Image (tube, helix red, strand yellow):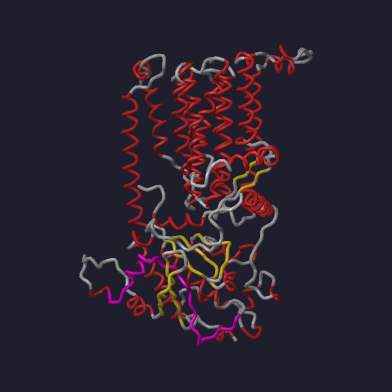
């Protein structure tokens, strides 16, 4: 079963990165260094290769650590210098991969997934060198450090999914957090890791016996103080992320997720909490996992965490629902808890020696269960597709001056249409000579009902109805699919023949009564054509036929998914040809800062498009002025969008 359904592939072309960086260190100190560093790499170097080189630096640190101390114990002092250098190189290369992508014009969702995936792995691997450098070793303090680090990263990814913006505050993990770790490793290299077990009262000659609170503070070790600082930063980031997510649910932006439910957003924290509960239960039942075998158990947890984060990133870039249930990961952790509960004596069998090499039998057992759950998930997905129908995406180019009729003031009409029809509507922010691009995703019947109402709103807002003029919408059809829109009735084709599943423009026109015109020209730099679906007027019979035509067109998409949603399709995006493949880095940075400022302003106030509304009708009652000659009655509009055949279907009936 693919991670991205074929019908969601067009959404990848709609992805656009958004970020806010408030870090003083990043903007004023490190950015000039990063701009100079990225110029060292030639343009033929792929951005993901730079990211991979950074991860290799961290893997070299881990290999060195396990060579000298596989139980996270002390290493030679000079080793910690290499840990700090490797970690700083990772931060530098991780920061310039995006700049290299902008230099080469290779920005895209794949880079987002690969970059965040490497960051998720580095979060766990960095905790291993941290445990050795601070003399924590294999202990519950190291587990606490791991949970705090993973929690901070998960929270940032969860926030980006809902807000659409990667928000880096004044103290962020990728910048200040990594620099703090580099400093810790350098101090360990100079003083030795035993420096961090000194108590506060031993290095600060103060009166620590003043009261009970100061006595407790004086007894704290330096490494414990570092963990408490990390916990404080995590608490601050939790509060900030909650505020940001709740804000975009109450006041959505162009970047934010379509679902405005606050409870559903908060439920996205459940996977991480549930994974922590299962992991803690497993560790409590088998204490040796912490005291003796944590060095190998932590990378195992890091892979599970990276899988969950990867699902979140895929859902973000392809506009899928949030991955609340990660059954393979839950099954692996639950199996470990079950084995620990039922057979405590198996610990001596599962662990071969004090090096914590886990038994092949255990991993073979877990792998078989993982394989079984994947087959079950695939079967359930096929059943769901057959019973309920899979989502479909229909994209169209709308007249620029009329597209606002589907947006409304502060996007109120867009959100009403989404809730009413159960679809997701995405308007592309860029506009060119072809019009405004809109993508509608949902079940076929919901999508067809939406386009029925959209036809009414588009060609009646602020305009007199011209019954002699054809009203149409330009849908985008991939070339591979348009070749199957051939003439000839489907009913004459034998059942099960090779032509089954093909579509016919003539038959759709004959059955629905609408006019379909497939234009021969292909949109520039794409593999898509324009299919114009038009009707003569907005009476009920014509609208019923229009809805039927959309149903048949969507059915053609579903029956020919391989052609409609092929990865080889080049989908139309307005801004594709506007950016040159290579440009100056400093200029790109200035444009990025301007873009980030405009994004940041959206957190304070929401911009909206009201170009559909005349100057004298700048209020929420614009829809009451659809009728000509000042007749203030919009009931006819509601009647047109219903299926009540007895209701009058024109504005003139209400005059």
Left or right of 301 on screen, residue 563: left
63 over 609 or under it: above or below = above
Q: Is residue 72 above or below residue 414?
A: above
Horizontal and vertical percent for residue 128?
Answer: 52, 24
What residue is at 58 percent from the left and 61 percent from the top? 429
The percent position of residue 627, horizontal first and vertical second, equals 61, 81
* For residue 638, side relative to residue 556 (left or right): right
Counting every numbered tag in the picture gives: 0
Against 583, residue 170 (above or below) is above
- Which residue occupies the foreground of this view, 342 or 7? 7
Q: Position of residue 393 (x, y in %)?
A: 44, 61
Q: Residue at x 77, y 15 (%)?
A: 211
Is the C terminus in the top left, top right, bottom left or bottom right quadrant? bottom right
Q: Residue at x 51, y 18 (%)?
A: 72
- Where residue 67 sits: x, y (%)? 46, 18
Residue 478 location, quadrant: bottom left
**Is 410 in the magenta?**
no
The stretch drawn in magenta includes residue 479: yes
Q: Which residue range is magenta in the image?
A: 463-489
Residue 149 in the image: above or below residue 411: above
> Residue 572 versus residue 617: which sits nearer the camera?
572
In the picture provided, is 85 more to the left or to the right than 313?
Answer: right
């Amino acid at each position: 079963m693919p991670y991205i359904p074929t019908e969601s592939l067009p959404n990848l072309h709609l992805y656009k990165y958004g970020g806010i960086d408030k870090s003083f260190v990043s903007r004023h100190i490190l950015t000039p260094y990063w701009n100079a560093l990225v110029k060292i790499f030639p343009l033929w170097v792929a951005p993901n290769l730079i990211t991979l080189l950074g991860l290799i630096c961290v893997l070299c640190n881990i290999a060195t650590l396990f060579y000298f101390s596989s139980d996270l114990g002390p290493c030679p002092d000079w080793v910690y210098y290499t840990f700090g250098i490797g970690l700083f190189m990772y931060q530098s290369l991780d920061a310039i991969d995006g700049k290299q992508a902008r230099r080469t014009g290779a920005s895209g969702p794949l880079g987002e997934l690969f970059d965040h995936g490497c960051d998720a792995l580095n979060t766990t691997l960095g905790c291993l060198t941290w445990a050795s450098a601070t003399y924590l070793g294999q202990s519950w303090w190291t587990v606490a450090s791991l949970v705090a680090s993973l929690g901070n990263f998960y929270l940032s990814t969860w926030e980006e999914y809902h807000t659409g913006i990667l928000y880096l505050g004044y103290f962020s993990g990728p910048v200040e957090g990594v620099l703090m770790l580099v400093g810790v490793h350098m101090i360990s290299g100079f003083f030795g890791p035993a420096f961090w077990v000194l108590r506060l009262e031993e290095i600060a000659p103060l009166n620590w016996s003043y009261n009970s609170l100061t006595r407790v503070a004086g007894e704290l070790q330096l490494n414990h103080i570092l963990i408490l600082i990390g916990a404080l930063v995590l608490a601050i980031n939790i509060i900030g992320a909650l505020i940001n997510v709740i804000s975009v649910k109450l006041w959505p932006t162009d970047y934010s997720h379509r679902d405005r439910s606050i409870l559903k957003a908060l439920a996205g924290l459940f996977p991480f909490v549930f994974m922590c509960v299962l992991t803690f239960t497993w560790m409590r039942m088998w204490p040796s996992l912490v005291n003796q075998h944590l060095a190998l158990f932590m990378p195992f947890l890091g892979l599970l965490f990276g899988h969950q984060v990867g699902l979140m990133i895929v859902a973000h870039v392809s506009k899928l629902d949030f991955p609340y249930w990660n059954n393979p990961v839950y099954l692996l952790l639950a199996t470990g808890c079950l084995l620990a509960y039922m057979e405590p004596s198996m610990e001596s069998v599962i662990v071969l020696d004090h090096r914590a090499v886990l038994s092949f039998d255990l991993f073979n057992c877990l792998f078989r269960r993982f394989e079984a759950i994947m087959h079950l998930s695939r079967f359930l997905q096929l059943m769901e597709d057959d019973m309920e129908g899979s989502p479909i995406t229909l994209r169209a180019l709308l007249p620029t001056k009329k597209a606002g009729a589907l947006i409304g003031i502060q996007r109120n009409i867009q959100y009403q249409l989404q809730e009413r029809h159960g679809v997701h509507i995405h308007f592309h922010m860029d506009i060119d000579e072809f019009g405004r691009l809109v993508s509608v995703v949902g079940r076929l019947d919901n999508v067809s009902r939406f386009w029925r109402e959209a036809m009414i709103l588009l060609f009646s807002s602020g305009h007199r109805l011209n019954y002699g003029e054809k009203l149409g919408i330009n849908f985008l059809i991939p070339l591979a699919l348009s070749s199957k829109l051939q003439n000839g009735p489907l009913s004459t084709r034998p059942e099960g023949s090779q032509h089954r599943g093909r579509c016919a423009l003539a038959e759709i026109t004959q059955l629905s009564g609408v006019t379909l015109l497939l234009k021969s020209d292909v949109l520039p730099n794409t593999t898509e054509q324009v299919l114009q679906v038009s009707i003569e007027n907005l009476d009920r019979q014509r609208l019923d036929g229009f809805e039927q035509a959309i149903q048949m067109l969507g059915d053609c998409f579903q029956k020919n998914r391989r052609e409609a949603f092929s990865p080889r399709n080049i989908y139309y995006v307005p801004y594709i040809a506007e950016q040159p493949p290579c440009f100056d880095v400093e200029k790109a940075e200035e444009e990025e800062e301007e873009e980030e400022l405009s994004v940041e302003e959206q957190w304070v106030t929401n911009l909206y498009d009201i170009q559909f509304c005349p100057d004298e009708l700048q209020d929420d009652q614009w829809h009451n002025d659809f009728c000509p000659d000042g007749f203030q009655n919009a009931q006819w509009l509601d009647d047109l969008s219903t299926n009540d055949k007895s209701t009058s279907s024109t504005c003139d009936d209400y005059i």
